[in-house]
Image (cartoon, rainbow, N blue to C red):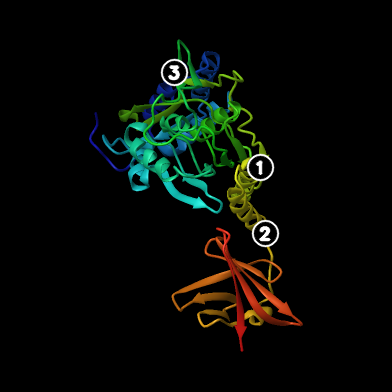
Amino acid sequence: MINPRSELPKLTEQLTKGIVEKTAETVRRQYVFAEDAERMAERLLSKQQQGAFADGETVPQLAKLLTDTLMTVREDLHLAVLPWNGEVEQSGMYDAWKRRWLRHNYEFRALEILLGNVGYLDLRGFASALVAGPTAAAAMQFLAHSDALIFDLRDNGGGEDLVYMLMSYLFDEAKHVHTARYRDHDEQSWTYAYVPGPRFSDHPVYVLISRSTFSAGEDFSYNLQQLGRVTVVGEPTRGGAHPVEFYRFPELYLELMIPNAYSVNPVTTGNWEDGGVVPDVEAPADGALSVAHEHALTRLVEVAEEDEARRFREWALETIRARRAGWNVPAERLALYAGRYTRSVVVEARDDTLRLSWGGRRNHRLTPVSEHRFEFDHGTQRVTFSVDNGDVKSLLWETEDGNAWTMERLT
């Protein structure tokens, strides 16, 4: 093992030859598709003999040339030749990725209970279940009382086996969800028979995807979609269905990411490698959350067994639809609503916004949702102004729980 170093050397003829030959040898031995692996190795060696890699001056430049050459045989987005600075610890693509986990809370970026009691989880990657399992369990416990779930994987670049732990919360029993097919054997992945905390086997579940969703993010989306367990919303993904292994050669400043298996879904016997994950509901990635939220609430209204639950969900659904419609009130009209309503409630128009305070304690921004109607407090409350001949006479204050008060405007 060489001494740790922070800089990569300039390429020499000998170093270039060593990198090309080692890449060809490793790809031939490890790449999942044997025939393609042979073609890739032969193409690298042939180009090396032709002097095609002689113009590279740095290891990163050569690594890119080699990756591009491999892609001419098969465009596998998981296959890459990478420079490595030779440090014994905390270097290379995989180690950099692992160091991010703890700094970014194992990629659990946001947890929220959305309007209508819809649980929301923004997850940017799947870490190892061994280290991230407790964080995942805590996240699912936070969502325990939700009536529906939304997993936001629009910026999820993939990862490790935490994907199967999180899948496990969506079933009552162990379920075969994925098979990795290697050259000489198969490995099945099942959901867990036990998970700490609640399960969500009967909840409507939505998964948000985009062009940035990749690898394990696609695994979660595609396999649950094919099992009929989730509704996928957003844009088609790029397609990366091959599990990978990393191979390092310190003396050559070389790291190889090589797919050594391909994924098989138990329902389709196929995967998402070529076509990506196709959403059930297509929507621009930036607007996918509101689309999924509306779908979830529509479903919850349909299955509501009690009038109270139905009214609560219909309130949320009306608000989400109004938000998507994008009602606007000209700034010059906001002054129409300003004033004092009873002794405690004050409505002010300032900075092109309308604000409501109660007893001087809270200052809520009012967002228009329809004619003379505004929402506030994350959509859980509304005020509707009663207007007669251009003058506001009173306001109706309502809450999502069904409470309502009429407040006369004071002169």
Between disc 1 and disc 2, the foreground one is 1
Between disc 1 and disc 3, the foreground one is 1
Q: Could you tell me residue 292's position as x and y percent?
A: 61, 45
Which residue was labeled with disc 3? 30
First in sequence: mark 2 vs mark 3: 3
Mark 1 vs mark 2, CA separation in Å: 19 Å
Q: Could you tell me residue 293's position as x and y percent?
A: 60, 48
Quarter in which the C terminus is drawn:
bottom right
Which residue was labeled with disc 1? 302
Marks 1/3 in contact by CB < 8 Å: the verdict is: no
Mark 1 vs mark 3, CA separation in Å: 51 Å
Mark 3 residue crowding within 10 angstroms, few (<14) / some (14–19) / many (20+): some
First in sequence: mark 1 vs mark 2: 1
Residue found farthest to the right: 389
Between disc 2 and disc 3, the foreground one is 2
Does residue 339 appear left or right of residue 9 in this picture? Answer: right
Q: Amino acid at mark 1?
A: Glu
For the point 42% across and 34% down, the residue is 82
Q: Secondary structure at mark 3?
A: helix
Residue found farthest to the bottom: 411
Which residue was labeled with disc 2? 322
Mark 1 residue crowding within 10 angstroms, few (<14) / some (14–19) / many (20+): few
Q: Quadrant of residue 92?
A: top left
Q: Could you tell me residue 134's position as x and y percent?
A: 33, 38
* Relative depth, front residue between 394 and 254: 394
Q: Is residue 97 visible?
A: no
Does residue 35 appear left or right of residue 249 in this picture? Answer: right
Q: Is residue 313 visible?
A: yes
In the picture, the disc for residue 27 is: none
Mark 2 vs mark 3, CA separation in Å: 54 Å
Does residue 372 appear left or right of residue 29 in this picture? Answer: right
Q: Secondary structure at mark 2?
A: helix
